Image: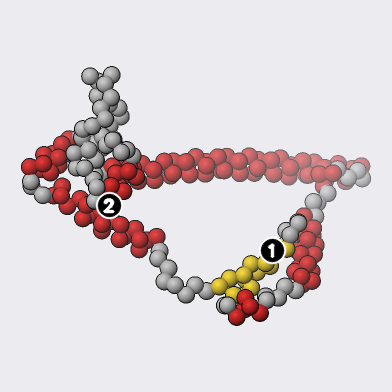
Amino acid sequence: MRVVSEGLFFHPDGSAPADVLNRMLDGTMNPRLDSPFLPAFAETHEARERIVAQISRTEGRLAMLRGMLARMDERLAAQEVATAHYAETGEIDPILLPSCESVAKAEVAKQTQQVKDEAAFVLPDELVKAGWSQKSVHVTDNDIIVTIRKTRTDAPVTVEETAKAVVEKFKIALQPFQVDGANFRVLRDRIATRPQQPKGPPDG
């Protein structure tokens, strides 16, 4: 087998989708070595793989929930039997005892609130003057965590806005492929008939 390191869609500096995209955006793309549509195909494949993985996780979660439901149905049936047994013998089966989880949660919440009140955290004056304010107090088993925040004064750039700007730059990088010049025209024809992601180098 002969490994081709140069030729259409094989670049010595790397032919990964990110490599191709970066070269197209910085203007160093070699139209004879780079596949211009590889980044778009790669994004679609990655998105599809994420969806497949999400479906798999969802199906696993659904199977677990159905198992939990079946166990609760079995517990209800056992409690019915235990109730009848209690009526006959006076014996209390442990399955008839409530967990009292809701009462326990209320007690824990009460204790947590008491800890927050006793903490009585006050922001230092220098932080207040700098524009900081207290957001929340969170109590864990080991710590009291105080979150503070400050309003941004800059103009934040969103991912969506940045992506739109990059796409426009990418469109400009694709323009040579729309020109009817000899090199680019031949390349367009070859792109149209060649897979975007060759599975392996040709034999030779």
Which residue matches tag 2? Answer: 26
Name which quarter of the figure residue 164 lies in: bottom left
Side (left or right) of 60 relative to 124: left
- The quarter of the picture where the C terminus appears is top left
User: Which of the colour schemes (rainbow, by chain, secondary structure, one colour) is used?
Assistant: secondary structure
Q: Disc 2 on helix, strand or loop?
A: helix
- In the displayed structure, 168 sits above or below 52; it is below
- Residue at the spot 22% in from the left edge and 52% down from the top edge: 173
- In the displayed structure, 125 sits above or below 163; it is below
Q: Nearer the viewer, residue 163 or 128?
A: 128
Side (left or right) of 190 relative to 51: left
- In the displayed structure, 160 sits above or below 70; it is below
Q: Disc 1 on helix, strand or loop?
A: strand
| CB-based contact (under 8 Å), mark 2 and mark 1 | no
The mark tally for this picture is 2
Residue 14 visible to the viewer: yes
Mark 1 neighbour class, 10 Å CA radius: few under 14, some 14 to 19, many 20 or more: few
Side (left or right) of 126 relative to 50: right
Front tag of 2 and 1: 2
In the image, residue 47 lies at what x, y percent?
A: 39, 45
Q: Residue furthest right?
A: 90
Give the residue type that dot 1 points to.
Ile
- In the displayed structure, 37 sits above or below 100; it is above
Which residue matches tag 1? Answer: 145
Side (left or right) of 197 relative to 53: left
Q: Nearer the viewer, residue 82 or 26?
A: 26
Q: Which comes before the other along the chain, label 2 or label 1?
A: 2
In the image, residue 198 lies at what x, y percent?
A: 27, 32
Q: Nearer the viewer, residue 148 or 70?
A: 148
Name which quarter of the figure residue 60 lies in: top right
